[in-house]
């Protein structure tokens, strides 16, 4: 039996790490942190029961996208989403669309070459969903820059991703290095294990 190629070995290792709650630095990206705006489409098909997921809503965000070994991770923070100190974080990794593929961490050549997935599920109200991102307009292949735009995606537990809004990248954030955690949630939106244990 032959030795697995490095990319296959990395995919297996990272996907197992995702299943085990992000052990091994799955979301330890090295990219810069940017300010951003999360803007949901006015006609977005969204689950009910979440204070954040409202058609037409906008929120200030912080975003870090960067390489981790062979894959890319994206960490998003909506500061004070539910009141002072009550943030909403989403941690995603380069992946693919549709079950079971959106559970796998896949290698990415650059920031535009893969869909990003939350890998495992969140509860939005009473509906289990997965979140995703896809590059829509990016100026550079290796890092985000001011004016870049990513499409925000959502799927049911067994469906495919559909677009629900934009994440528009702004200036660099100069307020230090924020910590991202799947446990930062509220307002009817919360990560389920293993995504609950993700850290970045």
Image (cartoon, helix red, strand yellow):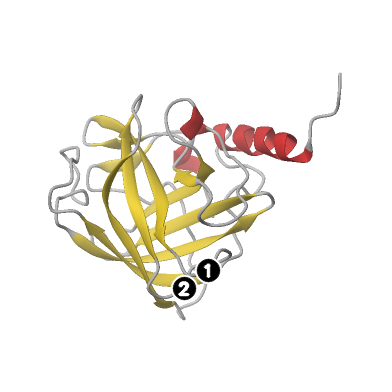
| Residue at the (18%, 46%) spot, across then down | 44
- Residue 64: x and y in percent read 49, 63
Query: Mark 2 sits on what residue?
Result: 145
Which corner quadrant of the image does residue 58 belong to?
A: bottom left
Which structural element holds mark 2?
A: loop
Cα separation between marks 2 and 1 = 7 Å
User: How many C-alpha atoms fall within 10 Å of the one at disc 2: few (<14), some, or many (≥20)?
Assistant: some
Looking at the rendering, in which quadrant would you find the C terminus? Answer: bottom right
- Residue 145: x and y in percent read 46, 73
Looking at the rendering, in which quadrant would you find the N terminus? Answer: top right
**Nearer-the-camera pick, 170 or 91:** 170
Q: Is residue 57 above or below residue 125?
A: below
**Nearer-the-camera pick, 118 or 168:** 168
Give the mark toward the camera: 2 or 1: 1
- Residue 54: x and y in percent read 16, 50
Which structural element holds mark 1?
A: loop
**Nearer-the-camera pick, 44 or 57:** 44
- How many discs mark residues in the rendered view? 2
Q: Is residue 119 above or below residue 159?
A: below
């Amino acid at each position: 039996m032959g030795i697995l190629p490095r990319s296959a070995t990395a995919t297996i290792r990272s996907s197992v790490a995702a299943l085990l709650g992000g052990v091994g630095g799955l979301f330890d990206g090295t990219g810069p942190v940017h300010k951003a705006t999360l803007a949901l489409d006015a006609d977005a098909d969204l689950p009910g029961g979440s204070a954040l997921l409202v058609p037409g809503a906008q929120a200030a965000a912080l975003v870090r996208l960067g390489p981790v070994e062979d894959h890319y991770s994206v960490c998003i923070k909506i500061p004070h989403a539910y009141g002072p100190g009550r943030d909403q974080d989403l941690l995603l990794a380069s992946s693919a669309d549709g079950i079971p593929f959106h559970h796998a961490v896949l290698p990415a050549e650059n920031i535009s070459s893969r869909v990003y997935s939350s890998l495992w599920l969140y509860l939005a109200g009473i509906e289990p969903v997965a979140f995703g991102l896809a590059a829509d307009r990016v100026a550079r292949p290796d890092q985000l820059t001011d004016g870049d735009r990513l499409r925000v995606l959502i799927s049911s537990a067994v469906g495919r991703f559909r677009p629900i809004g934009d994440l528009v990248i702004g200036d660099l954030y100069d307020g230090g290095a924020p910590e991202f955690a799947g446990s930062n949630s509220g307002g009817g939106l919360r990560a389920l294990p293993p995504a609950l244990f993700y850290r970045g």
